[in-house]
Image (spheres, helix red, strand yellow):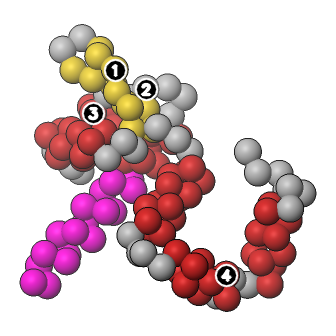
Amino acid sequence: MGDRNAERRLAGELEAGVLAALWAADGPLSPGQVQEILGGSLARTTVTTILSRLYEKGTVTRQRSGRGYVYVPAEDASGLTARRMHAELAKDEDREAVLSRFVSQLSSEDERLLRALLDGEGDAP
């Protein structure tokens, strides 16, 4: 069971690295270009698999380029974090309890920021 957790953690780290490469790029990247940016330590097939999984999750989009695909992030890092937060919230039937616990654990600065955003006073995109 420990090996499975290590594999999952490694996959998450690889996804994070691939996303970071895509976010830093000026345009769409092929799996080979992502592999180069990551230092070439991963096999191209591994990078392609990661990109395919990210595509299936809706985290990246792709378009045909020759015989393969090029990829771009579906949203910026903040948008992805927000989507993950929504997904976690949707997993629990007691939304009030989850939101209450979340808010109770915010720092005073984050609570102030959240209140300003809810009141329409923030700079949310």
Front position among marks 4 and 2: 4
Asked if 118 appears above or below 80 in the picture, the reply is below
Mark earlier in primary sequence (1, 2): 2
| In front: label 1 or label 2 | 1
Q: Where are the magenta residues, as a range?
A: 1-17
Circle 2 sits on which residue? 28
Q: Which mark is residue 63?
A: 1
Tell which tag, 1 or 3, sits nearer the viewer: 1
Is 88 on the left or on the right of 38, as rendered?
Answer: right
Give SS at disc 1.
strand
How far is disc 1 from disc 3 in space, using C-alphas? 12 Å
> x, y (%) of residue 49?
18, 43
State if disc 2 and disc 1 touch (CB < 8 Å): yes
* Residue, disc 3: 31
Which of the two labelled residues, at mark 1 and mark 3, occupies the earlier sequence position? 3
The structure residue drawn at horizontal position 48% and vertical position 69%, both measured from the top left corner, is 89
Q: Is residue 54 visible in this depiction of the protein? A: no
* CA gap, disc 3 and disc 2: 10 Å
Kind of residue indicated by mark 1: Gln
In terms of secondary structure, what is the magenta stretch mainly? helix
* Tag of residue 103: 4
Observer-side mark, 1 or 4, equals 4
**6 on left or right of 122:** left
Residue 37, quarter of the rendered image = top left
Between residues 42 and 79, which one lies in front from this camera angle? 79
Q: Position of residue 83 (x, y in %)?
A: 50, 55
Q: What's the residue at 30%, 39% (across, down)?
A: 55
Quarter of the rendering occupied by the C terminus: top right
Q: Amino acid at mark 3?
A: Pro
